[in-house]
Image (tube, coloured by chain):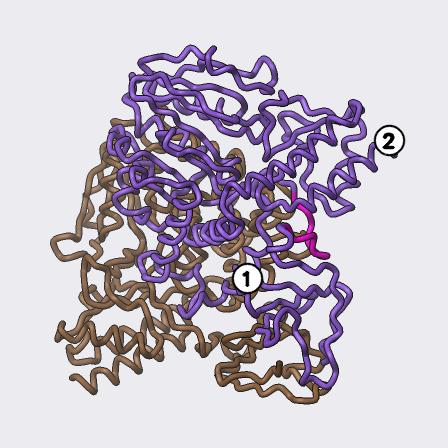
Chain colours: A purple, B brown
Amino acid sequence: MAMAASPHSLLLKNPNRPSNSFFLRTPNTTLSLPSTNGFFFTPSRLNKPLSITCATQVQDRSTTTMPTQSRDRVFNFAAGPAILPESVLKKAESELYIWRDSGMSVMEMSHRGKDFLSIIQKAESDLRTLLNISSEYAVLFLQGGATTQFAGIPLNLCKPEDPADFVVTGSWGDKAFKEAQKYCKPSVIWSGKSEKYTKIPSFDALEQNPGAKYLHICANETIHGVEFKNYPTPNNKDGILIADMSSNFCSKPVDVSKFGVIYAGAQKNVGPSGVTIVIIRKDLIGNAQGITPVMLDFKIHAENNSLYNTPPCYGIYMCGLVFEDLLEQGGLQEVEKKNMKKAEILYNTIDESNGFYRCPVDKSVRSLMNVPFTLEKPDLESEFIKKAAEEKMVQLKGHRSVGGMRASIYNAMPLAGVEKLVAFMKDFQARHG
Amino acid sequence: MAMAASPHSLLLKNPNRPSNSFFLRTPNTTLSLPSTNGFFFTPSRLNKPLSITCATQVQDRSTTTMPTQSRDRVFNFAAGPAILPESVLKKAESELYIWRDSGMSVMEMSHRGKDFLSIIQKAESDLRTLLNISSEYAVLFLQGGATTQFAGIPLNLCKPEDPADFVVTGSWGDKAFKEAQKYCKPSVIWSGKSEKYTKIPSFDALEQNPGAKYLHICANETIHGVEFKNYPTPNNKDGILIADMSSNFCSKPVDVSKFGVIYAGAQKNVGPSGVTIVIIRKDLIGNAQGITPVMLDFKIHAENNSLYNTPPCYGIYMCGLVFEDLLEQGGLQEVEKKNMKKAEILYNTIDESNGFYRCPVDKSVRSLMNVPFTLEKPDLESEFIKKAAEEKMVQLKGHRSVGGMRASIYNAMPLAGVEKLVAFMKDFQARHG
């Protein structure tokens, strides 16, 4: 059994053991070895040296911020669940079977044992650092997605007769409004529907209800690609602004102190599906309606540090790995810079295509995360998606409700992925334009 | 860099690639290699042969059904999240980074893409095979644990004035009853509380309310170790029996047709935390109260095949791997035999200890899954737990509400783990008896 590597082999510096550890990956083998002499693994004491063919050699993070595409990985432009950082997946792979000295997988740990407690506490602490969250806010790791919070927010913050204001800039804001109708008296004070959700209103023009319990926005509309670049000042009696940040959570710095509640499904930027993060000002906790299911009561979860019942432990662990990775990148200001660069080259390609590609969203509110676009010739769309998939760029089909294409370019999408996409787009235009 | 293995090295046959693949595991390295010559990896072309010390050599499943303890793994007696099959963890490890030819991790897959659809459909199909679930029942993969269903069941099945009967045989049945008080008029028709939840009533003695919408039981009380061995016949107008089976789900065959709803958190016998399985007779779907959060409405989830919003994809994938493993073991009849054997030797050790160990539960209803016991001399309990942990048997502390010890011996606990525990118990008794 020789250890000759195939042309698909890949020598990776292990980003989680930066000093002296590497992975050798081929289609059939995985080898994680400590190195004794720096970057390269030298099989000096083996008679037959390893033949290593590097499809891609990932450079040190200090010299380049994004890994390029592994030979056997695709660039995944899905809207969520979505691409995760390769380094995070490698870390998870390396400790899936046994986590540190625990003798077990994270998936097997009691949620009340010291090992898991260290995991969830570190995840919360790192998230607090990333978003500079003060002690006036509780951070909860819950289940059920943002859709569960569409009920949870009004159930916890409103009495049945309370008004609440909704700015609806896309399908998700609309869903939040409709669910709230069961538990309070919500009003849509602005809707972008008649303009196919391509705009965000001028905040001065918003006619807020002074008696509203809160003002609700969806900070980034995943389907329509519309993103708030700043935030309206709530004009309601308690000054509460609430945001669904599912699809741009941790993609840029946010002044949490402007919000009463921020909530987000993890499966776009910070982890796998199955974890929902709620950041809530503590004084807003404790007023749930009597009909609130115990699992939707923020007071229960805050008092029990998200451990009232069994939380989604493995998902929280994965979020923790992503938070560590974001901190290692230099925090959210650095992450935002990368996201702006990626979005810039993609939108520029669309805008400079002389109409071959079109993005319907107002330039001032285009999302850094989800880039919807259409083709001037719609009958080429299926060809575009098919050819892109052949080039290992997948999940580019637009949401069924809007059609066309959508490239989701979350934190974990490397610049190289977007560069490859725009090169493909230009080539496709040259062939079909 | 020589590849000399440490004394902790372990040569494992990869149970997921039975014909020709092995893992070499040491504290610092993981090597997965195809073998060209049968069971043993022969480094014939390496100048310095590998020194491999086998702590445990796992035998083929055809000759023994249980792997023994890996050198670096503990026996984990936690009540949930709990031990998972080693073969399942190895399979998950091997495809965490890239699943098959998808080019991505399962954690990154769109829940509407063909790859994940194949995963969830296979999981449902295998579960239907395991429990012989007819097409009259929907199988839903949800979030939020059984605690969410404590609200979901009455919200979906009752009007606010409807009575419902609860047999309360432990803490979880009591929690289900209390949550139902928000949404209907539940009654406790029998409670084991005064006898410290050590019994299950005679079914003849139950005074069921003929007008009740359903009769609710907790099939296995995780904290108290009390398990229904058969089931009461509902005497209510619709003949509906409902069971929380969280902690004995898929531990033995169950006649699903006797139930209106079976629900279970996955994190005991079938997967990681974060997945809740609901098996519901289809004619009971579609009558949710108006105040039901959309995420608790069975109709929404049934109509959308559990994909109304993003499901806990990775957890569902893990459950699917467990279902495959249970089928490979020969199905739930075979699994039950193993569970009976494990429980038998543990209860026998307790009962034959002349009172050194005591299990308070009625012999006829002792759980095959959760075995609570106390010491005649309670001041030895912390010593017992400490010494067991030194022997790599962990999480034996009883629930904080009942004290003493508890050994949870779910499907994935090998017979060797229980054998090691009883040997330890006998030795401990000999030292301290």
Q: Hey, which quadrant is residue A423 in on the image?
A: top right
Q: Callout 1 environment at 10 Å: few (<14), some (14 to 19), or many (20+)?
A: some
Q: Nearer the viewer, residue B380 or A371?
A: A371
Asked if the residue at tag 1 contacts the one at tag 2, i.e. Cβ–Cβ closer than 8 Å, the answer is no
Say if residue B283 shows up in the picture.
no
Say if residue A167 shows up in the picture.
yes
Which amino acid type is shown beneath numbered disc 2?
Answer: His
Q: Which residues are magenta?
A: A66-76
The residue shown at (68%, 65%) is: A11
The residue shown at (39%, 23%) is: A180
Q: Is residue A37 above or below residue B99?
A: below
Q: Which secondary structure lies at badge 1?
A: helix
The circle on residue A93 is: 1
Q: Residue furthest right?
A: A431
Q: Hey, which quadrant is residue B393 in on the image?
A: bottom left
Tell me which numbered mark, 2 or 1, is placed earlier along the sequence.
1
From the viewer's perspective, is A105 left or right of B22? left
Q: Report which residue position mark 2 lands on.
A: A432
Q: Return the x and y of residue A67 as percentages of the image width and height.
A: 65, 53
Report if residue A69 lies within the magenta region. yes
Q: Return the x and y of residue A252 as percentages of the image width and height.
A: 51, 37
